[in-house]
Image (tube, grey):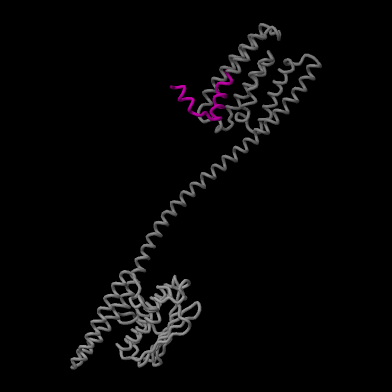
């Protein structure tokens, strides 16, 4: 069970190198000692040389034990060259050199210098350490140190050149690998920082998103309040104004027939205002547009207003009439109703006129009267009886990317002009002559 569990746990390259640097020196020292002991006679080691080699082996073991205690702690790839590492590398190199001098086969142990010079020595001393080990290896490969004759010296020189070249190449590759590892580490650090910044940005965006949702909800509530306020003003308020006017006539007359006629008008206005109020709450279009086009609805509205107020009023259509989008038609009808209500309430006019003009990509609505007028540059205080009408008309027009302009002068009448984009009804292309 333990073996199966261990087999499932992957071992990284860094962990394998940790194991090699911890136990490899003992294994290579033991192997070189055994091989050298078996070749004592082949290399003519004297008794004193054998004792010296044994003492050096014991010293190498002690050195390795000390290194094992000092080197514990941080992983190998995270360690920086230190004075202790430099001392350990130098002493081990001296022991390996002396052992190889006594028996060339101890070069098996000396080969360790090729593997750990990169993390034990400072960068400027790596090449020197590798060249020293190149000398040890070349001496072992040429038959032992010191060379015994000219041929052995030549062989030693050639092997030293070969080993030195290889060590320099390996040192260059090792340095490049270290640089790549450093760059990779820096890249990983930058990515981690970028990820941290991204997470922070995501958290900030989440907060901003929540804030925007709250603001959008508040804006939606405010917009709905404005819509209901405008609808109430255009329906209930105007209806109540008309009812009051009819009731005032009833209270001022002694003619029963005339009183009955105005009471009937007041009841009709009350029913109409109630229906419009319900439609406003449900966000529906005006009832006048249920079965009539905008032009027909405006014509009836102007006639009813003229009959109710006693002011002569006319309605004119210019251009080619086209089916309009529900929102466009409702907006222009409400603006016309509000402009006529303002005329009845404030202008004391004798005549009024409403013109609806189809002008290609735009449609305009003009409401004129010959009443007392006013100065548009004078800011009128908003109250329960004035001020909301003009603001409401402008707000309605702006909601569909339109504008409302007012031209007036004291004693010269008033003209209200609404200009909005001409957006056709959804079925206009398939049924160009279709009426509502």
- As for residue 230 lying within the magenta part, the answer is no
Q: Nearer the viewer, residue 316 or 244?
A: 316
Examine the rendered structure and indicate whether residue 350 appears above or below residue 376: below
The quarter of the picture where residue 313 lies is bottom left
**Left or right placement of residue 332 versus residue 257 in this view:** right
Q: Nearer the viewer, residue 401 or 155?
A: 401
Q: Residue at x 61, y 12 (%)?
A: 55
The magenta segment is 1-26
Image coords of residue 277 (percent x, y): 29, 74
Which quadrant would the C terminus be assigned to in this image? bottom left
The quarter of the picture where residue 41 lies is top right
Which quadrant would the N terminus be assigned to in this image? top left
Q: Nearer the viewer, residue 255 or 180?
A: 255
Examine the rendered structure and indicate whether residue 12 appears above or below residue 300: above
Image coords of residue 298 (percent x, y): 38, 82
**Left or right placement of residue 313 versus residue 401 in this view:** left
């Amino acid at each position: 069970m333990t073996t199966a569990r261990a087999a499932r746990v992957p071992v990284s390259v860094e962990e394998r190198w940790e194991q090699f640097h911890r136990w490899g020196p003992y294994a290579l020292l033991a192997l070189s000692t055994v091989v050298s002991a078996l070749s004592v006679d082949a290399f003519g080691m004297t008794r004193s040389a054998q004792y010296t080699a044994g003492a050096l082996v014991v010293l190498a073991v002690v050195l390795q034990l000390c290194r094992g205690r000092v080197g514990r702690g941080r992983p190998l790839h995270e360690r920086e060259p230190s004075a202790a590492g430099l001392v350990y590398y130098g002493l081990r190199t001296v022991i390996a050199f002396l052992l190889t001098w006594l028996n060339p086969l101890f070069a098996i142990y000396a080969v360790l210098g090729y593997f750990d010079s990169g993390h034990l020595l400072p960068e400027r001393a790596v090449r020197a350490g590798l060249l020293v080990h190149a000398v040890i290896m070349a001496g072992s490969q040429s038959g032992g140190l010191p060379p015994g004759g000219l041929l052995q010296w030549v062989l030693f020189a050639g092997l030293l050149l070969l080993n030195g070249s290889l060590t320099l190449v390996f040192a260059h590759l090792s340095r490049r690998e270290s640089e790549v590892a450093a760059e990779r580490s820096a890249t990983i650090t930058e990515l981690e920082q970028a990820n941290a910044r991204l997470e922070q940005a995501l958290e900030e965006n989440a907060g901003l998103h929540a804030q925007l949702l709250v603001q959008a909800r508040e804006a939606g509530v405010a917009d709905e309040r404005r819509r209901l306020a405008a609808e109430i003003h255009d329906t209930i308020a105007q209806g109540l104004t008309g009812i009051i006017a009819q009731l005032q006539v009833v209270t001022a007359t002694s003619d029963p027939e005339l009183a009955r006629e105005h009471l009937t008008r007041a009841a009709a206005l009350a029913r109409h205002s109630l229906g419009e109020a319900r439609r406003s709450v449900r966000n529906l279009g005006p009832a006048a547009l249920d079965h009539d086009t905008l032009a027909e609805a405006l014509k009836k509205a102007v006639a009813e207003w003229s009959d109710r107020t006693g002011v002569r009023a006319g309605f004119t259509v210019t251009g080619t009439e086209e089916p309009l989008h529900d929102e466009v038609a409702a907006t222009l009808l409400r603006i016309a109703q509000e402009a006529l209500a303002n005329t009845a309430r404030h202008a004391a006019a004798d005549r009024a006129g409403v013109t609806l003009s189809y002008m290609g990509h735009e449609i305009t609505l003009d409401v004129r009267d010959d009443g007392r007028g006013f100065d548009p540059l004078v800011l009128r205080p908003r109250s329960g009886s004035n001020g909301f009408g003009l603001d409401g008309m402008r707000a309605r027009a702006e909601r569909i990317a339109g504008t409302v302009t007012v031209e007036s002068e004291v004693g010269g009448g008033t003209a209200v002009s609404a200009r909005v984009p001409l957006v056709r009804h959804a079925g206009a292309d398939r049924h160009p002559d279709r009426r509502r």
